[in-house]
Amino acid sequence: SDNRLVNDSSVRSGVQALGTAREGVNRIRGNVAALALGVNGDLQSLFRAWDEQANRIIQQIDKMTNALEDNRESARRTSLRHQESIQQQTSQVSSGVFEALT
């Protein structure tokens, strides 16, 4: 249906946006890692702590991406089950009407 296509499109857009965010965080992680190479002491600890937080952000982005894709698949399966049920009910009603008329 048109509604499902819009939902699929929305999910694709969401997954793409999360992928772009993930790429951005990874790019910045690389930049920070390059800066941290020549640093020692407290500043090195700060860079390491920042990298750990960036890694947590990436993990959360991955979880959100997986949840979007899982929800889309679940909605697709539910839609197919409903369509099958509607077809069965329609067939039964049509048969009942035909029998009543004959």
Image (cartoon, rainbow, N blue to C red):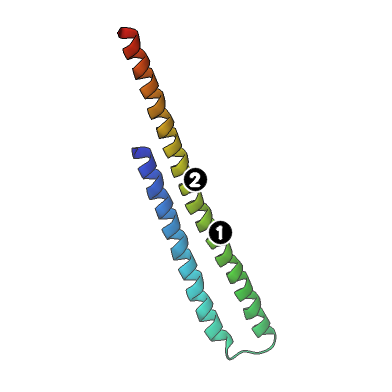
Asked if residue 85 is positioned above or below residue 57 in the image, the reply reads above
Tag 1 secondary structure: helix
Q: Badge 1, how many Cα within 10 Å: few under 14, some, many 20+? A: few
Asked if residue 1 is positioned above or below residue 20 in the image, the reply reads above
The residue lying toward the viewer, choosing from 34 and 76, is 76
The residue lying toward the viewer, choosing from 60 and 70, is 70
Q: Position of residue 27 (x, y in %)?
A: 47, 75
Indicate the amino acid at tag 1.
Lys
Indicate the amino acid at tag 2.
Ser
The residue drawn where x is 34% and y is 18% is 94
The residue drawn where x is 65% and y is 90% is 40
| Residue assigned mark 2 | 74
Q: Position of residue 22 (x, y in %)?
A: 49, 66
The residue drawn where x is 31% and y is 13% is 98
| Residue assigned mark 1 | 63
* Count of residue discs: 2
Asked if residue 32 is positioned above or below residue 102 in the image, the reply reads below
